[in-house]
Image (cartoon, helix red, strand yellow):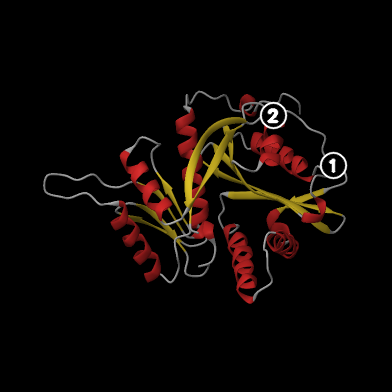
């Protein structure tokens, strides 16, 4: 598998730029997240929301946010006005907006105005880094693991998701328990989308890892890489990723991308060892 190029099976003549790939990966994420609820265009961006899963951040957020500029007969919208509109929009749908994804880059008036306003409200900035795979570099995997389609056992997948989400929750309050339930149900709901495929790794009969591949045209986007808390740093993630990359090659995809939080150094190190190269970044603002 060393040095395997994804585009050997399907030569890449698309001449897509890194900006094109970044935009395609981002749009693919929006389509996947909308599977847990709905997406609706607003004056200042696109709102994703879910009345069924109001506590799930990836189902309730605002993306591609830009303040419309003023015109001769139409005044512009301030960051404060945009924020009020968005809060009212989500409240009317019995949920809340968990984060904003501004369009543009620092130096853009809209981007800077939104950032200043959200920072003043104590929202927290977080950077997400995107990667693309030019060439897969094989790493030692685990031959003792059994990989089955993610849809083959919802019971085992739920067992894994329950363990992973519980490990990332600080307390055992009733509110936290409801949040965990909604997160797991929303992740399982996404599997209704036929563009989504993936693997569930089993050690014996125990579910130990999960990863997903969503396809959008000739682009594949990796998401949902999860490893059971008791099986981390045991090459489960590498085994899942190499198998998923092989699936992408056999599906004759031209490009394979993924996204990770900038502070997740262990995950980034793994992706880079596999051959993933930096593609770009996006800044999001998270509700305090």
Q: Is residue 286 left or right of residue 155?
A: left
The local secondary structure at tag 1 comes to: loop
Name the residue beneath numbered marker 1.
142
Q: Which type of secondary structure does the marked residue at label 2 adopt?
A: loop
Where is residue 106 drawn, in percent x and y? 40, 36
Q: Position of residue 190 (x, y in %)?
A: 57, 58
Q: Relative to the observer, which residue lies in front, 64 or 81? A: 81
- Answer above or below: position of 84 versus 177: above
Residue at 32 percent across and 61 percent down: it is 85
Furthest residue in direction bottom, as rendered = 174
10 Å neighbourhood of mark 2: few (<14), some, or many (≥20)?
Answer: many
Q: Provide the residue designation for mark 2.
A: 136
> Marks 1/2: CA distance?
17 Å
Q: Which quadrant holds the N terminus? A: top right
Q: Position of residue 142 (x, y in %)?
A: 84, 42
Looking at the picture, tell me which residue is in the foreground, 84 or 156. Answer: 84
In this rendering, would 148 be left or right of 77? right
Q: Mark 1 Cα within 10 Å, few/some/many (few <14, many 20+)?
A: some
């Amino acid at each position: 598998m060393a040095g395997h190029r994804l585009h050997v099976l399907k030569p890449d003549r698309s001449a897509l730029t890194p900006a094109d790939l970044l935009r395609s990966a981002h749009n693919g994420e929006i389509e996947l997240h909308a599977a847990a609820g709905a997406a609706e265009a607003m004056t200042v961006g696109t709102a994703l929301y879910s009345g069924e899963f109001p506590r799930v951040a990836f189902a309730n957020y605002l993306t591609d946010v830009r303040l419309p500029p003023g015109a001769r007969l139409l005044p512009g919208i301030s960051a404060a006005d945009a924020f009020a509109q968005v809060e009212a929009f989500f409240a009317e749908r019995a949920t809340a907006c968990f984060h904003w994804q501004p369009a543009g880059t620092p130096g853009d008036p809209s981007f800077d105005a939104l950032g200043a306003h959200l920072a003043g409200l104590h929202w927290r900035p977080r950077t997400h880094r995107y990667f693309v795979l030019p060439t897969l570099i094989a790493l030692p995997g685990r031959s003792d693991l059994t990989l089955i389609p993610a849809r083959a056992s919802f019971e085992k997948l739920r067992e894994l998701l329950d363990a992973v989400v519980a490990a990332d929750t600080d307390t055992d309050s009733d509110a936290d328990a409801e949040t965990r339930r909604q997160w797991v149900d929303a992740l399982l709901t996404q599997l209704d989308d036929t563009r989504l495929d993936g693997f569930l790794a089993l050690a014996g009969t125990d579910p130990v890892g999960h990863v997903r591949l969503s396809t959008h045209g000739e682009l594949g986007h990796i998401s949902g890489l999860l490893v059971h808390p008791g099986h981390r740093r045991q090459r489960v993630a590498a085994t899942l990723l190499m198998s998923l990359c092989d699936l992408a090659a056999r599906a004759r995809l031209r490009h394979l991308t993924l996204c990770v939080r900038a502070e997740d150094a262990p995950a980034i190190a793994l992706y880079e060892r596999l051959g993933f190269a930096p593609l770009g970044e996006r800044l999001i603002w998270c509700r305090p």
